[in-house]
Amino acid sequence: MLDLLIAASRDGLMTDLDIQEEVDTFMLEGHDTTAMGLCFITALLAEHNDIQDRVRNEVDTALQKNEQKYTIKLLQDLPYLDRCIKEALRLYPSVYFISRIPAEDVKLQTYLVPAGTFLHLNIYGVHRDSNFWSNPEVFDPDRFLPEKIRNRHPYSYLPFSGGPRNCIGQRFAMLEMKAMIASLIHNFYLEPIDYLKNLRMQVDFVLRPAQPLRVKFIPVCKTNASL
């Protein structure tokens, strides 16, 4: 990323301040959000053994075909893990609300929102709205099968915001999470210690539990030590 930014600077497309702002976005906005996303994903997989086993089978099969090497292509070819992460971000979006100030009056059906109004958009609530999601409290990765998302409202799912101001790092974040989870699931069985239903959420810039969220990691016994 930094090489691309420096190249753009040399072409006169960016200033040093522009580069600093882009790096700040990735470092400051991208580490805590991704970390909390990983916490919730591992907790959900720990609580759902059947889903965890299916992810492990997918990862193990992909690694066998790829000589036990993690590559970008391998991570991109893990569709079930991808759906698991998307479903985890539906239930526990790291950025659970966003704010906007419209530059002009906006008509919402019969209600007029005047320009300059502070709008707070409840992403957490939208992701659990039964108008868009059946059994919204249930962890079901198959909600994100291609045939099921085809006709879904484009703004019913906003883990990375939406529109022209959506997260510039969302693809990078998904690859980060897939790389972490694939390696963890390949090497460990996950078992819950704390259950998500018993946790209180803390109001912060990033969604996080108000108390510890613990998961037990049990090493997977490999028949071949080199694995």
Image: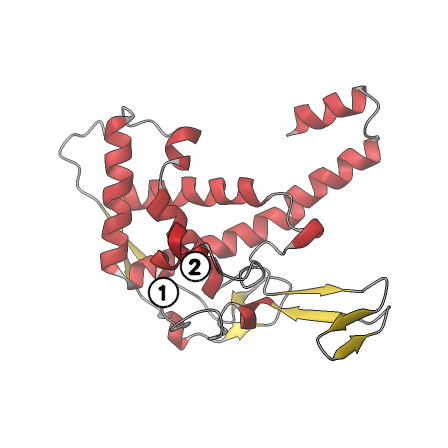
Q: Nearer the viewer, residue 156 or 28?
A: 156
What residue do we see at 46% from left, 45% from top? 177
**Could you tell me residue 195's position as x and y percent?**
35, 70
Q: Cβ–Cβ below 8 Å for labels 1 and 2?
A: yes
Kind of residue at disc 1: Phe
Image position of 169 with respect to 68: above or below: below
Q: Is residue 103 visible?
A: yes
**Could you tell me residue 165's position as x and y percent?**
70, 51
Q: Residue furthest bottom?
A: 110
Identify the element where label 1 is drawn. loop
Q: Considering only order in the chain, which callout, 2 or 1, is on the residue closer to the N terminus?
A: 2
Q: Is residue 218 visible?
A: no
What residue do we see at 51% from left, 57% from top? 36
**Could you tell me residue 43's position as x and y percent?**
37, 60
Q: Find disc 1 in the rendering and name its residue.
A: 139
What residue do we see at 65% from left, 44% from top? 168
